[in-house]
Structures are given as C-alpha cells and as structure tokens.
Amino acid sequence: MNTSAVHPPLFQLGYVPHDVEAALDYWINAVKVGPFFKVPHVPYDAVTYHDAPTTIDCSLYIAYWGSVQIELVEQHCDSPSLYNESLRAGERGLHHICYTVEDIDVARRRSLAAGGQIVQELFFANGGGIYVDFGGGPGAIVEILQAPPEGKIMFDMMQGAAADWDGTEPVRVLGGP
C-alpha cells in the first residue's frame, strides 16, 4: 500500500520553547543539528487565531536534521496565538508536525471534512499555512504549509548548508550580518 497518498512525508518538527537560547544550545550542541537560520520578524500578510484576526510578531529559527526541518518559534508580542497559548499552558516538547502541500485551499477543505479544527491560519503571498487540531492533546497539532517558490528556494539552501555544516556559525541571521 502506498501510504504517501494518505500520509504526506513529514517535513518539519516544530517547537515553541520557553527559552529559545536553551533550545538552540540543545539542538546545536547535544543533537548536533545546524546551522540554524534565524528568520527575524516574519512578515505575514494576515493571521487568524480561532477565526479572529490577530497580529503576530515572531522570528523563526530553522535547521535541518537530514531531510526533516527543525523549527523553533519565538513570538515577540503578547498577541493571541497558538504559540502564546502553548507557552501560557506550560506545554513543553513537540508543538506541531508539518507537511507541505501544493494547494492550501484543498488542504483546508480536506482538514475540515476530516473533523479537524483550524486553530490558526497564516496568510502570505503565493502560499499560506494552517494549524489544524484533529484532537489528541499537546503535540497533536498539524501544520499544513503551502510554501511560496522563494520559500522553497530558501529551504533548499538551508538543507544544503546542513549537509555541509562543520559546526561553525551555528546561528545565522537571514537578511542580517
């Protein structure tokens, strides 16, 4: 049986750590994953949380562990979001898993038809993302991402950097020094 039609390949393990520096230290020094690329203050066109508009100022730290992306989310504001909800609840460990799709609108319809609740939605040009709760508690959130073409190019660059990483420059800021 071809399970990839039912279960798309895992793309990402996502975390919302209480202490980003400690999380980076763990991944870089204990697990030897890197380099991490900081995407500062992600420019979303719009965000909804429980169907209500919200504004999220967050930075992402992204690295690759083989073919799996590791994402650390750092929210810089108190705006309502799935990230702040998890932090306030004291949740630790895996926050969400993610897979990618070519059409976020189809993924949204399928998720709702399967009984999922869209908790948070991210809107950006040529793509978007939804966080779906299919039930099951912490760590059961599924992010579904339609990455824009420039995002795919960025992810390929990050994965290539991980393949050749020698331990130097463990955290690199995109668009920065």
Image (spheres, rainbow, N blue to C red):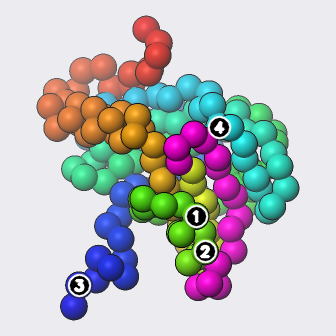
Which of the labelled discs sits on residue 44, or is there none?
Answer: 4
Q: Are marks 3 and 4 in contact (CB under 8 Å)?
A: no
Q: What's drawn in magenta, residue-wise?
A: 112-127
Nearer-the-camera pick, 87 or 50: 50
Pointer 3 local density, CA inside 10 Å: few below 14, some 14–19, many at least 20: few
Whether residue 124 is situated above or below residue 110 in the rendered picture: above
Dot in front, 2 or 3: 2
Which of the labelled discs sits on residue 2, or is there none?
Answer: 3
Dot in front, 1 or 4: 1
Q: Are marks 2 and 3 in contact (CB under 8 Å)?
A: no
Q: Give the residue at the far top of this rendering.
A: 177
Q: Sequence-wise, which precedes: disc 4 or disc 2?
A: 4
| Residue 103 x %, y % | 48, 61
Q: Amino acid at mark 4?
A: Tyr
Q: CA distance from mark 3 to mark 1?
A: 24 Å
- Residue occupying the point 54% across, 69% down: 106
Q: Amino acid at mark 1?
A: Asp
Q: CA distance from mark 2 to mark 3?
A: 22 Å
Q: Is residue 93 left or right of residue 168?
A: right
| Residue 88 x %, y % | 76, 53
Pointer 4 local density, CA inside 10 Å: few below 14, some 14–19, many at least 20: some
